[in-house]
Amino acid sequence: VEDPEARKSKLAAELANGRLAMMAIIGMFFQDGLTGSAWGDWSLYTSSPLRAREPKVARNFFGGGSTSSASFDPATELGVQDPVGFWDPLGLSADKDEATFKRRRAV
């Protein structure tokens, strides 16, 4: 392009379109991580490891209040991901005590 103003305008448009395309592909990567599909199948959202979790009661975070229930499973906590899965080589979570697990995670 010979004209400096036209060249400047076209370069600015090229940059803007490139940035828009980068944001779009990042959005598709994020959606693929949430749903397993980059093409909008939101019915898959519930089985994603990145899905929103149910809120937990904070009063048992440091072991106060009642003891953990027998249904606590550290392998279902946030951060457990393939290919390793739940990794506890020392067996620190073998007792399946939720309060102890949360305290160790926080410290």
Image: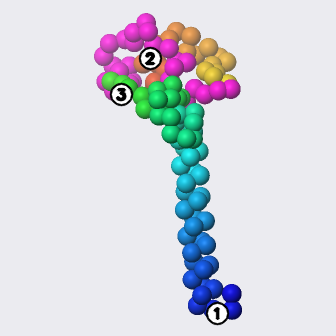
Residue type at mark 2?
A: Glu
Disc 1 secondary structure class: loop
Residue 56 appears left or right of 74: left
Per the model, the C-alpha gap separating discs 1 and 3 is 60 Å
The boundaries of the magenta stretch are 58-83
The front one of 77 and 107 is 77
Which residue does the numbered mark 1 point to in the structure image?
Answer: 3
Where is residue 62? Give x, y as percent: 39, 24
Please identify, in this view, whether the residue under mark 1 or under mark 3 is nearer the observer: 1
* Disc 3: which residue: 55
Question: In percent of the image, x 39 and y 9: which residue is there?
Answer: 69
Towards the viewer: 57 or 102:
57
User: Where is residue 20 shown, x and y percent of the image?
Assistant: 54, 62
Note whether 25 is above or below 83 in the view shown: below
Asked if residue 1 lies left or right of residue 63, the reply is right
Instruction: Look at mark 2 in the image and give the residue it sits on.
Output: 98
Q: Is residue 55 magenta?
A: no
